[in-house]
Image (tube, helix red, strand yellow):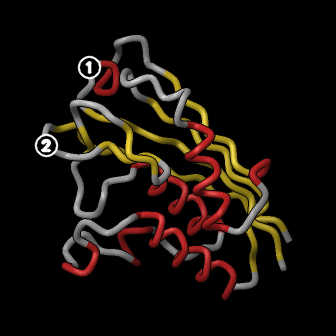
Amino acid sequence: MIRIGNGYDVHKLVEKRALILGGVNIPFELGLLGHSDADVLTHAIMDALLGAAALRDIGYHFPDNDPKYEGVDSLKLLAEVDKLIRDKGFKVGNIDATIMAEKPKLKNYIDDMRENIANVLNIDLDCVSVKATTEEGLGFTGRMEGIAVSAVCILESM
């Protein structure tokens, strides 16, 4: 059996926060606001995986009003999601994610993001695609008010 999932997440850019994407701390004057580390890339991927397995969403599993998730490393949450989907009899086939951000330029960090995600999910690097694009100054991402990520995945029966 094959299942397809999609995920989408947005976090606001603010001062005095780290910019973490795919577990990579990216030097930039703004970071993402959130209860956890606000890793919008990892969050969108988790929602895609949970959706494909019909396991609801990250807010259900990791509520933003629970103090134990305050500042948590989202890669640790991704590992928990991997366990949930494996417990349901699935494994990750592949992931494809697109980061929408006007700045900073992310091309020098993409390989590290892919490697982090692949390592946590225990899948081949070739099964993880991460891309970045600007939105040509349009919308909230173009105005640098936030960063959005869209992700899709395939789960396969084990």
Residue at 38% x, 39% y is 26
Q: Secondary structure at mark 1?
A: loop
Vertical comparison of 30 with 128: above or below: above
**Residue denoted by label 1:** 143
Residue 105 circle label: none
Q: Is residue 36 above or below residue 126?
A: below
Tell me where residue 24 appears, x and y as whole percent: 45, 48
- Mark nearer the N terminus (1 vs 2): 2
Residue 147 sits in which quadrant? top left
- Secondary structure under the numbered disc 2 in the rendered image: loop
Residue placed at 65% from the left, 67% from the top?
A: 121
Q: In the drawing, does residue 45 fall left or right of residue 29?
A: right
Q: Position of residue 115 (x, y in %)?
A: 64, 52
Name which residue lies at 61% across and 82% down: 83
Q: Is residue 39 above or below residue 60?
A: above
Q: Nearer the viewer, residue 32 or 85?
A: 32
Please, what is the three-letter code of the amino acid marked with disc 1?
A: Arg
Q: Is residue 58 above or below residue 151?
A: below
Q: Residue 94: horizontal and vertical position, in percent?
A: 75, 54
Q: CA distance from mark 1 to mark 2?
A: 19 Å
Residue that label 2 marks: 16
